[in-house]
Image: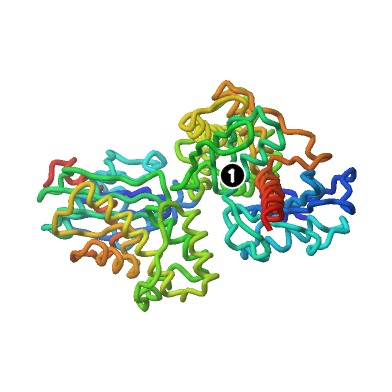
Amino acid sequence: MIVAGLDMGVQNVKVVLLKDRKILSRGLAPSGFEPEKAVEKAFQEALEKAEVAFSDIQHITATGVGVELAPKFDSKISVVSADARAAVYLHPSARTVIDVGAEESRVINCDEKGSVLDFALNDRCAAGAGAFLEAMARALEVKLEEMGALSLKAKGTTSISATCVIFGESDVVSLIHKQEPKHEIARAIYDALAERIVSMVHRVGLKPDVILVGGVARDIGFAAALKRKLGTEIVIPENPEYAGALGAALYAVENLGGR
Amino acid sequence: MSGDNIQYWRWREYRLTVPSVKWKNAETITAGIDVGSVSSKAVVMVDGEICSVSVMRTGSSSPDSAKKVLEWALEGTGIKPTDINYIVGTGYGRVNVPMANSTLTEIACHAKGANYIWGPTVRTILDVGGQDIKAIRCDEKGKVLSFIMNDKCAAGTGRGMEVLADLLKIPIEEMGEASLKVEEEPDPVSCTCVAFARTEAVNLLRRGWSKEKVLASYMRAMALRMCNLLERVGCEKDLVITGGQSKNIGIVSRVEKILGIKPLPPPNWRENGRDPMAAGAIGAALFAKALYEKNKNTT
């Protein structure tokens, strides 16, 4: 039985193919201005890797911020539900899921079956998501991919507030003027975002194990800051950005009566 | 020039001199410098009358911006920096106005400036700048009674307009008019986060919305945020609007519609220099006069 999970993210469209609940392949394409093309591309990548045809897919479950832009699917679920399912699949003892995406972030408490018990959402403010890091890297004039490693050299001598991307930019610019070293500013940036996320964690309750997913989970600077601010170990799966698509695919299995 | 080279977000910088104001036999010459997050303003006053005004973009360094904007205000007036008796710095970058004799908050300065521009009937001031929205209550002398500002988030401020001007390719000074060209006022956008303005607008355009409708929706959301602050501070007549967005008819008309209170129209500022955008600098120059006179009398 082959099924697909489709995650219509703000930045990327992601596809995960499952065969008998095992991951067959993944595909990803930038969302861009033409969502249909992005979906086609992501599917194409996944299908080629798995060496199966589109017609072999028995059920597609879609999720993601842009789910209404998905051209075709058989069922849909919320990102929160998808994250919870994926988390327990990837790490069976996961009970708190932190998902930091490009423009949204979520913290979810789930049970051992991957059902949602409680969650907190940040979706109206860029300061609580990956967009914050992007804007701050621009203000700091470093590449986002390099900011993480840079921040690890810092001792933590300064801080900025992450109540707002726009105010954060001003903070970063004034720190540059004060000749604060770039690696210290980088660490302050990650700490600020991590603090926002930690406050969401405390809203729902911190229950181990904690798993971090979403595109921002790949950022070593953020992962380190989150660990620091949370004071607990964090599990980061391989391919954390595919969690939503994976969770959707697991729902597709359930929709077909599988477990 | 190819269309892509136009910087739609660029608003016009200007300076002006009020020809009727003579400074040679003046008792006091003072200046107010308001370094905002987006624009810097300088006002030179001669015996409490506006002599010249300049408005320009704030650069990456506040001290440089303060220096430049004051030099520009003085240009052609014959007044030298050393002729100025007292300078007050204000605005978001006020701690970085090196030539200032003292600094004051922009809240005090906007209230004072609004009182000067429109007179003693002003009770509520809505100041909308590049990344600030402030609702200020004042008395008949322009003294601040209370205020509320957006201290946590820049949503709904002028910065979003720059982002949209670029995206929609509409010159920033024409956006207000454009936003009024809709048959029916659309619902406000659900999110006015400046960092999301682009995605928000792109999503609406993708749904087939016209540029004008997108602007109307965004400006309505901005105006709602402003009115929320005004209601919290307790909006009493007369209401006036200062700051850069006072020039945005799309915002001004929507605030009026939502509140049911008509803000006082801007004065003929191109002739008398009483530009609502420079209200903070005007207030600062007035405080400078008062402080100079106070110091002179005590020493």
Q: Residue at x 65, y 46 (%)?
A: B280
Figure check: B134 above or below B118: below
Q: How far from the left and from the top, in percent, is residue B236?
A: 56, 25
User: Helix, strand, or loop for circle 1?
Assistant: helix
Q: Across the whole image, how many numbered discs are drawn on residues?
A: 1
Q: How far from the left and from the top, in percent, is residue B92?
A: 57, 54
For disc 1, the neighbor class at 10 Å (few under 14, some 14 to 19, many from 20) is: many
Q: Is residue B204 visible?
A: yes
Identify which amino acid the numbered label 1 is placed on.
Ala
Q: How far from the left and from the top, in percent, is residue A134?
A: 46, 61
Q: Residue at x 33, y 49 (%)?
A: A7
Judged from this view, the residue extending furthest toward the bottom is: A153
In front: B52, or B214?
B52
Colour treatment of the image: rainbow
Q: Is B9 situated left or right of A4 in this image?
A: right
Q: Is B249 situated left or right of A228 in this image?
A: right
Tag 1 residue: B108
Based on the displayed image, in which of its 4 quarters is residue A115 positioned? Answer: top left
Figure check: B137 above or below A202: above
In front: B180, or A53?
B180
